[in-house]
Amino acid sequence: TRQIVLASRPHGAPTAENFRLEEVDLPEPDEGQVLVRNSIMSVDPYMRGRMNDVKSYVPPFQVDAPLDGGAVGEVIASRSADVPVGAHVLHGLGWREHLVVSAAKVTVIDTDAAPASRYLGLLGMTGLTAYVGLTAIAQLREGDTVFVSGAAGAVGQSVGQIAKALGAARVVGSAGSPAKIERLLELGYDAAFNYKETSVRDGLREVAPDGIDVYFDNVGGDHLEAAIGHLNKFGRVAMCGAISQYNATEPAPGPRNLFQAIGKGLTLRGFIVGQYPELAEEYRAKASGWLADGQLVGDETFRDGLEGAPQAFMDLLEGANTGKMLVRL
Ligand code: NDP
């Protein structure tokens, strides 16, 4: 079977040389293990951080070892009574076509209830990230105006729609192309601007003339600085990601106007979705309802073949995706 290994650590933006496709032998499953054929794998911005040799909330990838990440697949051989052949499972061993794993490490998913890809997006980590950020972190209140950066991405698309479902009065966003802006308006964003055509500061003034109460930050950098300047008194920031800085080779400067947090009484709070497992069930119940009645819609951008996964990941960092970026294996 085939897998992708980290050939070398990227300096700045990753390139094809940082990845290598390898052929490896598969062991037979032992008692309690299953053999899975992966069907879809996720590529995610956080993987860029794991390519650096630094301590973080997840251990770094090792050079010459296979990459990993969220994936779904079908069990094709089983030595576990709990997870039979034919079961569709969610697990953390993407970037490979097959895997042998303990049955305790996979979650059986119901592909009649929703397509397998959904468990890597709206019904998985992506949707939960949006929900945790808006509720536990930003303490969203009815009537709030919410600003979302990276709004046309996987998390960002969910944030706008979930904020509306939870009672936000106005939801505005930024993204990097005219097509993405158009899509955001179709998805229920009240207004959106292209940060490549206007400064974030000017864009915000235009889409939210009365200021913002919540900023859901996927981008950091200029976006965070402009949002701090535009937040209303007692505004709240959910610090979810800082993708504008993931390829940086030097430490990036902080927001120059951070002191405004004092006078405005702002709260800036970071989070990792995995720190809030107690919200997963509550979210899934709500998300199923929102999906069923059409309040929550998520685009998916598919690429094909394991050999295409590195390019899919590189393209994700450059904004080639609308909604969730996935690779069909
Ligand atoms: P996305 O689907 O949003 O893909 C990344 C997007 O980032 C691209 O499509 C691109 O869109 C945008 N982007 C890339 N470079 C820049 C830049 N310099 N400035 C502004 N936008 C840029 O990925 P996810 O939805 O998976 O993740 C979104 C964010 O959420 C990331 O920061 C990620 O790290 C974070 N995250 C955090 C989690 C947590 O637990 N805290 C969990 C999951 C994700 P465009 O065309 O608009 O530039």
Image (spheres, rainbow, N blue to C red):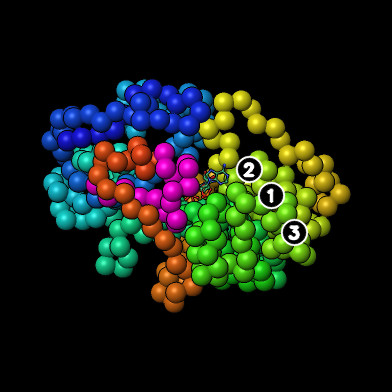
In front: label 2 or label 1: 1
Q: Say whether marks 2 and 1 touch (CB < 8 Å).
A: no
Neighbourhood count class around disc 1 (C-alpha, 10 Å): few under 14, some 14–19, many 20 upward:
some
Per the model, the C-alpha gap separating discs 3 and 2 is 18 Å
Looking at the rendered structure, the number of numbered marks drawn on it comes to 3
Which residue matches tag 2?
220
Q: Where is residue 88 in the image (x, y as percent from the top left)?
A: 24, 55
Q: Is the residue indicated by label 2 positioned so its CB lies within 8 Å of ligand 1?
A: yes
Q: Is residue 245 left or right of residue 4?
A: right
Neighbourhood count class around disc 3 (C-alpha, 10 Å): few under 14, some 14–19, many 20 upward:
some
**Residue lying farthest to the right in this orientation:** 263
- Amino acid under disc 2: Gly
Q: In which quarter of the image is the N terminus?
A: top left
| Residue segment shown in magenta | 314-329
Per the model, the C-alpha gap separating discs 2 and 1 is 14 Å
Answer with the quarter of the image where residue 43 lies. Answer: top left
Which residue matches tag 3?
205
Q: Position of residue 210 (x, y in %)?
A: 78, 65
